[in-house]
Image: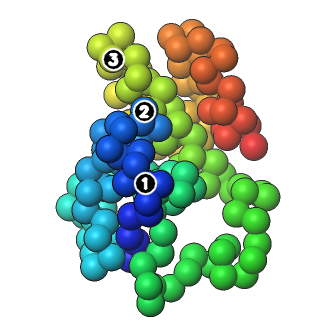
Amino acid sequence: MKYTKTEAGQQAFKQRLPSITPRQRTLFILFDGQKTVDQVLAATGAAQADVQSLVDQGFLEPAAGSAKPAAAASGAEPHVQHSDQQRYLEGRALATKITASLGLRGFRLNLSVESAANLQELIELLPKIQAAAGADHCKELEAALRG
């Protein structure tokens, strides 16, 4: 799959919106419609969830001639029912975003999020993230993890 930047994505990038993490900024720069997702991920060491976040926000779109994602091609709603793996990937991206926004205060917590290997480990970290960032900032994360 190859992606290109959307106009909305270019504007968000220029405005340095906080919804684009530093890792996602690097990904965004590399997507030029020529490189595949695998090539970009290999070059950056980022996760597929980071790419999906940029797509979900409307900052990236499939390049012309590139295959559409299965959910989009079938017309299915992509957020109807998440598998544990999808919830893990979405939750990890959200948790990383939240803990990274805490700066040095959230550094160790960010490391814990990065080392979480599955959904259950992320769910176990949720109370610590909520304590550090506040429950209001973690509502989306809690919804993603709990399904």
The Cα atoms of the two marked residues, 1 and 3, are separated by 24 Å
Splitting the image into 4 quarters, where does residue 17 fall?
A: top left
Query: Contact, CB < 8 Å: mark 1 with mark 3?
Result: no
Q: Residue at x 66, y 17 (%)?
A: 136
How dense is the environment of label 3, judged by Cα within 10 Å: few (below 14), some, or many (20 and up)?
A: few
Q: Residue 125's x, y, as percent?
A: 55, 24
Q: Residue 66's x, y, as percent?
A: 45, 85
Q: Residue 114's x, y, as percent?
A: 38, 36
- Callout 2 amino acid: Pro
Image quadrant containing the N terminus: bottom left
Q: Is residue 13 left or right of residue 116?
A: left
The Cα atoms of the two marked residues, 2 and 1, are separated by 13 Å
Can residue 52 be seen? no
Image quadrant containing the C terminus: top right
The number of numbered discs placed on residues in the rendered structure image is 3
Would you name the residue on which mark 3 appears?
A: 103
Q: Residue 97's x, y, as percent?
A: 45, 33
Q: Given this view, does label 2 or label 1 mark the residue nearer the observer?
A: 1
Q: Residue at x 57, y 40 (%)?
A: 91
Query: Contact, CB < 8 Å: mark 2 with mark 3?
Result: no
- Callout 3 amino acid: Gly
Q: Given this view, does label 2 or label 3 mark the residue nearer the observer?
A: 2
Relative vertical location of residue 42 with respect to residue 33 in this rendering, above or below? above
Would you name the residue on which mark 1 appears?
A: 9
- The circle on residue 18 is 2
